[in-house]
Structure formats: C-alpha cells, structure tokens
Image (cartoon, grey):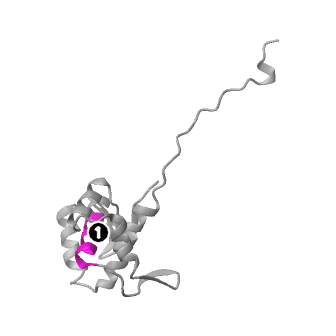
C-alpha cells in the first residue's frame, strides 16, 4: 500500500514519502527517537476544524523534528508540480524549500500539521498483506474419470 502523501506546500504541490533510508536518518537526526514517538508528539498539537486538521497548540512538537520530517519527506517523495510543471526534489532543493517555507521563515503551526500528516501516512497506511495460500484444486463433476 502506498504510504506517500501529496499535498499543497510552499510554491506548488509536493509528494512526501519516507522510505527506509529517510526513516533511519529521521530517527537518528531527532535524537534516536522513534517515529512513533515523533508522531505522538505532533499529534498532541493537532485538532480538527471544518473536517480538516489544524494546529491546536500544545503538544511537544520540536522545530528540529518538524524541519527534519518535512525535509526528508521531500527528498523521499522527490516529486513536485510547480506552475503545472513536474520537477524532482533532491536534497539541495529540499533544504532550500525548508529554509524558505518552514519555521522560522513561516509560522510553526503551518509546518506542524504538514509534518504530522507525513508521519501519519507512513505509520497508519502501511498494511501488511497476508501471504496467499494456494487453494487445493477440486475436480469438477464433468472432469471426473468414471
């Protein structure tokens, strides 16, 4: 199941995805903190208003964590649509976007919701598939030897 999320952000619409390399880097960069703990910290400041998620204040969100989540999500997603044109988002571009559009350049409340959505997508949309078991073939009455 797809764990990426595409959302309006900065100067366009960006695909955010945290693959295993990004998840390992995220946990390391955030003080060896589990992504489950990071998501829980962010969730503490998220509310719902008019059927949309909003910053409600409180919680234990850290600017460092929020910036890392969004930056690594941009790198993992590696896709943007800006003014109708598709482009890639590598590490350098991701860093530039973070500096221009995430706290302290913009209010922290904007970034907290985005960071939470990225982590929430990774954690709650992963579904393990059950291993398919082969059904035993049954003979139909017309194929039975008589």
Q: Residues within 10 Å of mark 1 (few under 14, many from 20)?
A: many
Quadrant in which residue 27 is drawn: bottom left
Q: Position of residue 86 (x, y in %)?
A: 32, 62
Does 146 sit above or below residue 18?
above
Magenta span main SS = helix
- Taking the spot 18% from the left edge, 72% from the top edge, the residue there is 96
Q: Position of residue 78 (x, y in %)?
A: 29, 60
Residue under label 1, please give it: 69
One can see residue 84 in this view:
no
One can see residue 95 in this view:
yes
In the picture, the quarter occupied by the C terminus is top right
The kind of secondary structure element at disc 1 is helix
Does 72 sit above or below residue 63?
above
Report the span colored magenta: 62-74
Residue 60 forms part of the magenta stretch:
no
Q: Nearer the viewer, residue 5 or 144?
A: 144
- Taking the spot 33% from the left edge, 82% from the top edge, the residue there is 110
Classify residue 51 as left or right of residue 103.
Answer: right
Question: Please, which residue is most extreme toward the top here?
Answer: 146
Quadrant in which residue 60 is drawn: bottom left
Q: Tally the numbered discs.
A: 1
Quadrant in which residue 123 is drawn: bottom left
Does 39 sit above or below residue 24?
below
Does 41 sit above or below residue 143?
below
Residue 64 forms part of the magenta stretch:
yes
Q: Position of residue 73 (x, y in %)?
A: 30, 64
- Taking the spot 42% from the left edge, 59% from the top edge, the residue there is 3
Q: Position of residue 71 (x, y in %)?
A: 25, 68
- Taking the spot 32% from the left edge, 55% from the top edge, the residue there is 19
């Amino acid at each position: 199941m797809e764990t990426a999320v595409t959302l309006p952000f900065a100067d366009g619409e960006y695909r955010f995805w945290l693959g295993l390399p990004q998840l390992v880097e995220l946990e390391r960069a955030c003080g060896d903190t589990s992504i489950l703990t990071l998501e829980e910290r962010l969730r503490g400041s998220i509310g719902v208003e008019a059927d949309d998620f909003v910053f409600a204040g409180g919680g234990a969100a850290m600017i460092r964590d929020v910036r890392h989540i969004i930056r690594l999500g941009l790198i993992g997603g590696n896709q943007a649509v800006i003014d109708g044109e598709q482009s890639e988002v590598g590490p350098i571009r991701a860093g530039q976007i973070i500096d221009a559009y995430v706290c302290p350049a913009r209010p922290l409340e904007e970034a907290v919701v985005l960071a939470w959505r990225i982590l929430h997508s990774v954690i709650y949309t992963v579904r393990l598939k059950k291993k398919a078991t082969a059904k035993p073939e049954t003979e139909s009455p017309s194929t039975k030897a008589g």
